[in-house]
Image (cartoon, coloured by chain):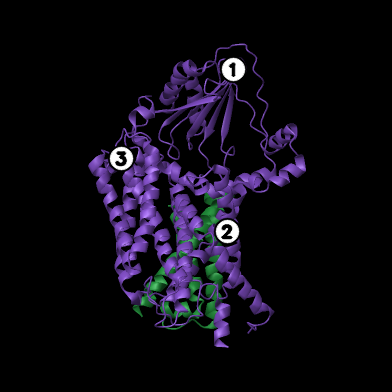
Amino acid sequence: MSDPTGLHGAFRQSMAWLHTWTGLFPAILLYFVFVTGTFGYFSYEIDHWMQPELPSQGEIPSNRAMAAIALNHIESNLTEQGGELTRYFIGLPTSRTYQYLMAFANLAEPNAEGERFIREDLDPVTGVLISDVARDTGGGTVLYRMHYALHYLPYVAAYYAVGFATLLMFLAMITGVVTHKKIFVDFFTLRLAKGQRTWLDAHNMTSVLALPFMLMITYSGLLFFLIEYSPGTMFLTIGLDRGAIAELRAHRYPESHVGDTTGVFADSPALSDLIAYVEEEWSDDEIRYIEITSPGEENSIVTFGAVDQGLHRDRGFTVMRFNASTGEILAEDPARPYDSEFYQGALGLHEGRFSNYWLRWAYFASGLLGSGMIATGLLLWAKKRRSLVRTGMPVPRGVAFMDRVNIGIIVGLPLGVAAYFWANRLLPIDLNGRAEWEIHCLFIVWVLSFMHAVAREVRSAWREQVGSLAAMCLLLPVMNALTTEAHLGNSLSAGDWERAGFDLASLVFGLVLCIIWPRLTTPSHGSIESPEIADPAIIAGSSVQAHKVST
Amino acid sequence: MTFLLGWLVALFGKLLLALTQAKQARLLLVSAPAGSYRWALRVLGSFLLVASAFQSVAAYGLGVGLVTFFSHACFAAWCVSLFLTWRRSLS
């Protein structure tokens, strides 16, 4: 057996210390990032649920019909607004993207507002502007965006804060593995009703069993803002030379040369014929977008993009290009260099956009495990401090404070997210700044949760907040049925699994919380607040201290 | 179906690997298996995990297949852990 007081023991003890503080310091931010990011795996489905006025997937017309609607809108409405257009982009609803039609155009000259492009989202059935038919909402996209851009903060400050927290988490995970001495022996172990030991097992299980996901998500998360996090590298290697930057970009994303604008106009084969050809070629895939550059000119190019099928994030999905004048198929883009492939692959892994439904649920569940890992780590830290307090002595203020903060973090944020969904159904449809008010509701409820935790006795606060969360989850489908036509009965009968899945998931969450709720009242089940400790040395990442006690 | 098949193979693999640990095996069997049986279970469990990885790669390609396999391995381990926890609560 190794000597815990020797070099080996001292190393593990240092790692345990580092694990505790690198995990604890950014825990609030990381929990926010994990919870909101987890919802991001179903951002399109949440978008769809939060705009019940939009048609269900079964009602969406053919690609040809939608392309005609979008093209007509671009050529009439957007040309009126922006003058000459140099590029059209039509985003089509698919089973894995937004459920509306996107009409997007680049302008030859900036318009009166100084913008170089116009985007308008349309109802895919009627072609009416979404803003005229559906409620204003941030949807799931806002939750997804919050996990890296936060809210109420400048974008730059937010991604630096998230990046720093992610770096600390990466460190906490590596030190956690070093510290966790019985990683294989305890691999399948969760001992219930053992007080602090139960929380330690839960912390280990949530982190160790999903370790590949945790390592991947933190590492690839850091890669997202690689240049921003290390601006010196770019500056020192290529300086501020625009030509060199363009060269680097061309190296990373090589494209076939598609010709310059000629100003010579030509007749194009009908877009619907090209769509029919692509649909036949991609019989097992869906068209995600259609892009037309230099529309109407001799060297105009029509590009079709398919839904992401591989690990690649941006341009890796299948693309088919045509010369718009002749209908001739153009050469594919050259292969990207390995560094670019690796980078895009890592980003693709992080976002999981390639995933089928099964795999997306696995991503979602892994995100929940990550949130659980942070939550159990926080609870364990507070329990450990509490266990060191002798019987009859007052609990130190710092520990009492953390007990309450833990409630506000762990239950308060999900309460806020539930309030965000409730606000979507309850706020007046014509409220000015409605989408922003939905987000305000999230943060108002989160703050109220902290205030409630401070005002109430700890165990009561846990019970009341978890009970409220369970009620909010269980009643959300009821509220949906009372306020919209897109309720569970209708969505199930229409085969609209995106909306039905949201309601069903809400019910499942509510039921799980109902199972947990009575256990919060029973100390023998390792209750959140119970002060009983069998062995104070058995704490997260401190098997070394256990050695010290035993020797 | 392909996805579920890969997960089931990984689940059996993890279950066999759990049986190689005396502490876990006692929850599932009357007594922990002898050394040579444990070795055989370890080989068979590992083989099933490799088979699950191959099945995922064959079905979804190398990149997505490996991601799928890791999700199978993770959630199979979770199911085994929860099953053992339930067995422990009965004993």
Asked if the residue at tag 2 contacts the one at tag 3, i.e. Cβ–Cβ closer than 8 Å, the answer is no
Circle 2 Cα neighbour tier, 10 Å, few/some/many (<14 / 14–19 / ≥20) = some
Q: Which residue is drawn at 39% across and 38% down?
A: A435
Residue A294 on image: x %, y %: 59, 19
Q: Name the residue tied to disc 2.
A: A215
**Of residues A74 and A468, which is closer to you in this image?**
A468
- What is the letter of the green chain? B
Chain A colour?
A: purple
Circle 1 Cα neighbour tier, 10 Å, few/some/many (<14 / 14–19 / ≥20) = some
The kind of residue on which mark 3 rests is Leu
The kind of residue on which mark 1 rests is Thr
The residue tagged with tag 2: helix, strand or loop? helix
The residue tagged with tag 3: helix, strand or loop? loop
Q: Residue at x 57, y 30 (%)?
A: A320
- Say which quarter of the image contains residue A23: bottom right
Q: How many labels does the image show?
A: 3
Q: Name the residue tied to disc 3.
A: A427
Residue A392 on image: x %, y %: 39, 82
Viewer-side label of 1, 3: 3
Relative horizontal placement of residue B20, taking residue A519 as reference (left or right): right
Q: Earlier in the sequence, mark 3 or mark 2?
A: 2
Is circle 3 on the same chain as circle 2? yes
The kind of residue on which mark 2 rests is Leu
Q: Which of marks 1 and 2 is nearer the N terminus?
A: 2
Q: Name the residue tied to disc 1.
A: A326
- A443 vs A13: above or below: above
